[in-house]
Image (cartoon, rainbow, N blue to C red):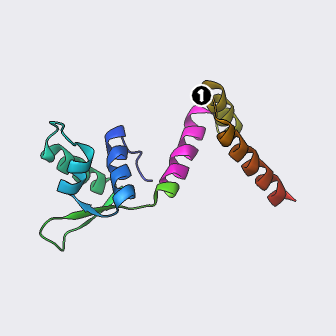
Amino acid sequence: MRKRPTPSELAILDVLWSRGPATVREVHEQLNPGKSTGYTTTLKLLQIMADKQLVRRDEMQKAHVYEARMPREQAQTQLVRDLVDRVFGGSASGLVMHALSSKRASPAERAEIRRLLDEMEEKKK
């Protein structure tokens, strides 16, 4: 991801990742059901996101269609790498330890973490 998305931009990306390519109106309606946020705000954010290369704009139709430039998983990976580098001095264990100590993980989440660690250990062999 060339530029980090703002919280509002992440909300738009979440809509696009969930539903796929969409017009400004479709994004706006999903983002703001019953809210007074203006359509033009959503449009402006999508234009900024296109400039930042977070989304692609298809101008072939009358209503422009926007789509995320990268899959959710790839964006998450880049954002986590950036967070680890900027906040935890490059220490992935620092991030994990902080995350586990600040929010209680469910038994299912802990089991999944153990499974992933075991999988990583197996790959090292």
At 40% from the left and 48% from the top, the residue drawn is 3
At 22% from the left and 53% from the top, the residue drawn is 47
At 59% from the left and 40% from the top, the residue drawn is 85
Q: Nearer the viewer, residue 88 or 12?
A: 12
Q: Residue furthest bottom?
A: 60
Specify whether residue 79 is painted magenta: yes
Question: From the viewer's perspective, is 37 left or right of 3?
Answer: left
Q: Residues within 10 Å of mark 1 (few under 14, many from 20)?
A: few
At 24% from the left and 53% from the top, the residue drawn is 27
Residues in magenta?
A: 75-88
Q: Quadrant of residue 22?
A: bottom left
Indicate whether 72 appears above or below 41. Answer: below
Q: Residue furthest top?
A: 102
Q: Secondary structure at mark 1?
A: loop
Q: Position of residue 96 (x, y in %)?
A: 66, 36
**Quadrant occupied by the C terminus:** bottom right
Main structural element of the magenta stretch: helix, strand or loop? helix
Which residue is denoted by mark 1 in the rendering?
103
